[in-house]
């Protein structure tokens, strides 16, 4: 996939090694993993950890900071991808940053409301939050000239500005990828929020909202 430079990159790098945990919020497939890998490519002693891996999850959930730091080794930039899956992740990060303030920890999560709730209290005063959004026109101008941007505007408005969709040439594949993103977000992230039990409610709500675009929406 073609790498598109994100404007937020410089803002995040400016906070490196300020004794803060850097938290990147954003929905699935928005480019958080790609962004973090780009952020650290110029640095040595970096470690990227996928928190959904059972071995990583089990290690972090021990809350044994000495054991965790031993696993980190000499690496001083640590990426924790999909950090919201770790139980008590806010407390774990607080222990790490208080014990090893020279570590630069970057945590990302797909479900921003879940991640925010888990980080909020333990990391008060110890974190800087960033929101990663879909691609902007200014970011797309790095890969398309202005005439191409105008030509592709109807396509952008239909299929959106997710990086993987933008860089896919086939309209058929764009539709498939968009359906997958929508399904994953609705039936994994949103469905887990407050333990919703009826997925058909989300379908009905989404359909009702779609039919009322640009109109007043009744809460009932």
Image: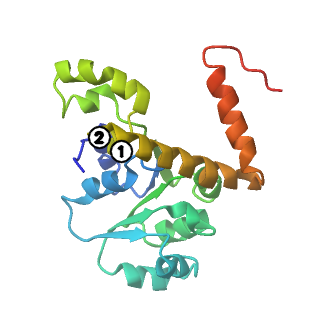
- The one of 10 and 178 positioned closer to us in this rendering: 178
Which residue is found at the position 58% from the left and 77% from the top? 61
Contact check, label 1 and label 2, Cβ < 8 Å: yes
Asked whether residue 211 is in view, the answer is yes
As drawn, the label of residue 173 is: 1
Is residue 143 rendered to the left or right of residue 162? left
Element type at mark 2: loop
Residue 151, given in percent of the width and then of the height, sits at 25, 20
| 56 versus 212 height, above or below | below
Q: How crowded is the residue under tag 1: few (<14 C-alpha within 10 Å), some, or many (20+)?
A: few
Which residue is found at the position 72% from the left and 36% from the top? 204
- The one of 21 and 81 positioned closer to us in this rendering: 81
Which residue is the extreme one toward the front?
172
Number of numbered discs present? 2
- The one of 19 and 162 positioned closer to us in this rendering: 162
Q: Which residue is mark 2?
A: 170
Residue 206, given in percent of the width and then of the height, sits at 65, 34
Which residue is found at the position 29% from the left and 58% from the top? 37
Element type at mark 1: helix
Residue 85, given in percent of the width and then of the height, sits at 57, 65
**How was the colour assigned to the protein in this rendering?**
rainbow
């Amino acid at each position: 996939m073609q790498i598109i430079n994100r404007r937020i990159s410089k803002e995040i790098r400016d906070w490196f090694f300020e004794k803060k945990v850097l938290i990147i919020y954003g929905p699935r497939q928005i480019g958080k993993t790609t962004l973090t890998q780009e952020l650290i490519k110029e640095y040595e002693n970096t470690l990227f950890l996928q928190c959904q891996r059972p071995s990583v999850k089990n290690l972090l959930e021990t809350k044994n900071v000495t054991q965790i730091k031993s696993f980190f080794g000499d690496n001083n930039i640590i990426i924790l991808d999909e950090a919201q899956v770790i139980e008590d992740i806010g407390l774990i990060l607080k222990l790490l940053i208080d014990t090893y303030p020279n570590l630069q920890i970057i945590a990302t999560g797909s479900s921003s409301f879940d991640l925010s709730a888990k980080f909020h209290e333990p990391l008060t005063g110890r974190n800087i939050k960033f929101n990663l959004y879909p691609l902007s026109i200014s970011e797309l101008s790095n890969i398309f000239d202005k005439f191409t941007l105008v030509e592709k505007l109807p396509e952008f408005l239909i299929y959106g500005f997710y990086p993987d969709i933008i860089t896919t040439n086939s309209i058929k594949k764009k539709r498939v990828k968009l359906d997958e993103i929508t399904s994953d977000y609705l039936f994994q992230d949103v469905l887990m929020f407050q333990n919703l039990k009826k997925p058909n409610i989300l379908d009905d709500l989404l359909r009702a909202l779609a039919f009322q675009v640009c109109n007043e929406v009744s809460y009932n």
